[in-house]
Each structure stands twice: as structure tokens, then as C-alpha cells.
Amino acid sequence: MDFIITLLFFLLYLLKFDRKIKFLFCPLVDVFNSLIAALFFLIVGLFAIITKSNVGTLVGGIFVILSFFLCIADSIFLFKKITFNQPRGRTVTN
């Protein structure tokens, strides 16, 4: 599911539909993509930890929960880098 969502966003950028769709703020779409991936990882990780049918499932669930935290951190860093109503690019100081 996460792969398909990421692929759709990639096609959106590749075909330059992000310039044609004015109601969609594209940097914020990356944040939502990270949050959707984090939610997906949380659900899968909790199911793996709760079932814990063997040690491999438990270890896999722990690694998926760690990826959940990495996706949350990614979305936070992306949101901090978004410039709302500010010029993009480098700022030159003299």
C-alpha cells in the first residue's frame, strides 16, 4: 500500500501534474506520505508484536516499530523545511 502511494506521488511529480493541480501543496504531500507510511508501519508492527508466533515475528515487529519512529521523524523534518510564503533557494548575506 505504501509503495503504491509513493509510486503515485512519484508519477505526479514525473508527469508534472503538481504544477497543473493548484489546490495541492506538493511539499505538504511529502509530509502526508510520511505520515501515511508511519501509520501503516505502526499497524503492521503492532500486529506482529501482538501475535508473536515466533521470535522472528517479534523481532520483525520491533524493527517495524523503529521504522515507524523514523517515518515520524522524517515527517517532522520535512515539515520544518517547508517554507510557507517565503522565497525558495539560497539566501545571500553580505
Image (cartoon, rainbow, N blue to C red):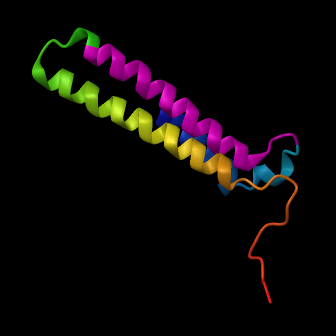
Q: Relative to 90, does residue 72 appear above or below in the rendering?
A: above
Residue farthest bottom in this picture: 94
The image quadrant of residue 49 is top left
Task: State whether residue 7 appears in this view.
Answer: no
Q: Relative to 40, does residue 30 appear above or below in the rendering?
A: below
Figure disc tally = 0
x, y percentage for residue 53?
15, 12
Q: With 48 as the anchor, is 5 left or right in this view?
A: right
Q: With 44 as the anchor, is 29 left or right in this view?
A: right
x, y percentage for residue 37?
50, 33
Residue farthest front in this picture: 94
Stretch in magenta: 23-49
x, y percentage for residue 65?
35, 29
The image quadrant of residue 70 is top left
Q: Relative to 85, does residue 60 appear above or below in the rendering?
A: above
Q: Residue at x 58, y 50 (%)?
A: 77
Q: Relative to 7, does residue 62 appear above or below in the rendering?
A: above
Residue 36 on the magenta span: yes
In this orientation, which residue lies closer to the viewer: 29 or 62? 62
Residue 66 on the magenta span: no
Q: Residue at x 87, y 40 (%)?
A: 23
Provide the major secondary structure of the magenta segment.
helix
x, y percentage for residue 55?
11, 22
Residue farthest left in this picture: 55
In this orientation, which residue lies closer to the viewer: 77 or 3? 77
Task: State whether residue 80 appears in this view.
Answer: yes
